[in-house]
Image (tube, rainbow, N blue to C red):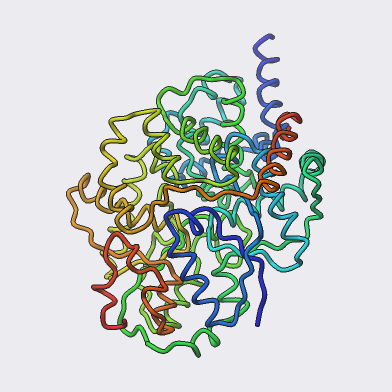
Amino acid sequence: MENRTQVHTFVDEIATIPGGEGIRLCIQCGTCTASCPNADKMEHTPSQLIAMARAGMKKEVLSSNAMWYCMSCYLCTVRCPRGIKQTDLMHALESLAVREGSSHGRTLTPNMYRSFNDFVYSLGSLPEFGFMTWFYLLTNPLRAFRMIPVALSLLRHGRLSIKARRLTPEGANQLRAILDKAESLGGVA
Amino acid sequence: MKYYTYFPGCSCSHGGAKAYGWSTQAVSKVLDIELIELDDWNCCGSTPYSSVDELASFCLSARNLAMAEKRGFDLVTPCSSCYVILNRTNSYLKEYPQVKTKVDEALAAGGLEYHGMVRVRHLLDVFVNDIGYDEISSRVKRNLSRLKVAPYYGCQVTRPAFGFDHPEFPQSLDKLVATLGGEPVPFPLKSRCCGGSLVISEEALALDLIDKLLDCALSNGAECLVTVCPLCQTNLDAYQSRVNRKFKANFDLPVLFFTQLMGIAFGLNSQDLGLKTSIVPAERVLAKYL
């Protein structure tokens, strides 16, 4: 009985997130999985993730690397015969995993996203060089070392700006006020 | 003269794709398009924000859209990611009233309001549909005859369907290449993914995809690729040496922004088009047209 309650709770939770409601429509045809360029590298394929979520396997779903391997190419979304926004469903699972503090130790994508978002929140724009350096140093300094040739070739061709683009002080304050207000309103659900 | 509000996005303004921004402006001028940059715009948040904090993602876009709405023109961006994220915000605000309520409240904290009236366009859409192939053809000074080009759309210019072109088998860039006199080669993977920002966090996974794309273009006889997205260009160009290393391959395929190719055909100066910023040198295959 307890298990059934849990089943409904997790699917409800996903379905209340805009874009997540389609989870109830899935017929397990596997079109999303067959279309996904990374399905073979995921611990669970996109259609498996949906089946697991509907079976109430919250912990297994949210700690999977699968949604973090989604590159938002939207091929599943345009092919789904049930009109499920599969890419957005993956985003919904990513948001839930972050909110629940689920472990996703096998992929660095959540850390990369966090570094990216921290820069955008503080500056209002993304300084690519600063962001990438920061991310590599934070997660894997050895990789930072391996990426030096790529960074040097970009630098040599004038494609790395050390200096970040800044908003006007008024614009920066306005953006901060909007984002802080959004934060206080909780998520989209 | 046609007027648009211009949203360059981070890559095309101060980032790695400055040449895309320069060539966009240079080519637009030839086509009598006035791109007026949106004052004080902010980053759209791209995939990272929309993946883990959707409300903030919608708010980042909504600030830009609210400012653009005051001007009344279509908002045009050369970046496929900005294009998807801004359009997605528009559709979510229409489709989900609870999202709109929260976004409105957040915008009000910044003294802004947005009524959902801004049409977000990709630069490719503006060129082929507002200006048209005939007009573009009339500006060609150096016919790119016999140049074999793989037209690479990537994902987000045609998917999900905000679209001006088919989500899986788009044609607009093929036709544009042909309009410039070039020969668009068959390129079955033309709307497949380059790995996007996962090239940073999961490089191995992205290099696999980039390898397949380059291999597909080369085996169909392409001398170069053209892209409509700053990230696609960076992945295929700057990471080409990493692909060569990993797969013991010898790819030497220049990857141009479609605006650079247009600029060359229009007889513009290669400096104004930022050709020197390509990591894989483009001059070798383009020499006879420069």
| x 55%, y 65%: residue | B166
Q: Is residue A128 left or right of residue A20?
A: left
Place residue A174 in its image quadrant. top right
| x 37%, y 52%: residue | B235
Place residue B51 in its image quadrant. top right
| x 66%, y 70%: residue | B4
| Image vertical order of residue B215 relative to residue B28, above or below | above
Q: Is residue B53 left or right of residue B182?
A: right
Place residue B140 in its image quadrant. bottom left
Q: Position of residue B73 (x, y in %)?
A: 72, 68
| x 24%, y 52%: residue | B241
In this figure, what is the number of numbered marks? 0
Q: Position of residue A57 (x, y in %)?
A: 57, 19
User: Furthest residue to the front?
Assistant: A169
Q: Quadrant of the C terminus of chain B?
A: bottom left
Residue B97 visible in the picture? no
Q: Position of residue B108 (x, y in %)?
A: 82, 43
| Image vertical order of residue B51 relative to residue B207, above or below | above
Q: Nearer the viewer, residue A10 or A157?
A: A157
Residue A136 visible in the picture? yes
Q: Quadrant of the N terminus of chain B?
A: bottom right
Q: Is residue A17 left or right of residue B98?
A: left
| Image vertical order of residue B157 relative to residue B23, above or below | above
Q: Position of residue B201 (x, y in %)?
A: 40, 36
Q: Is residue B254 left or right of residue B232?
A: left
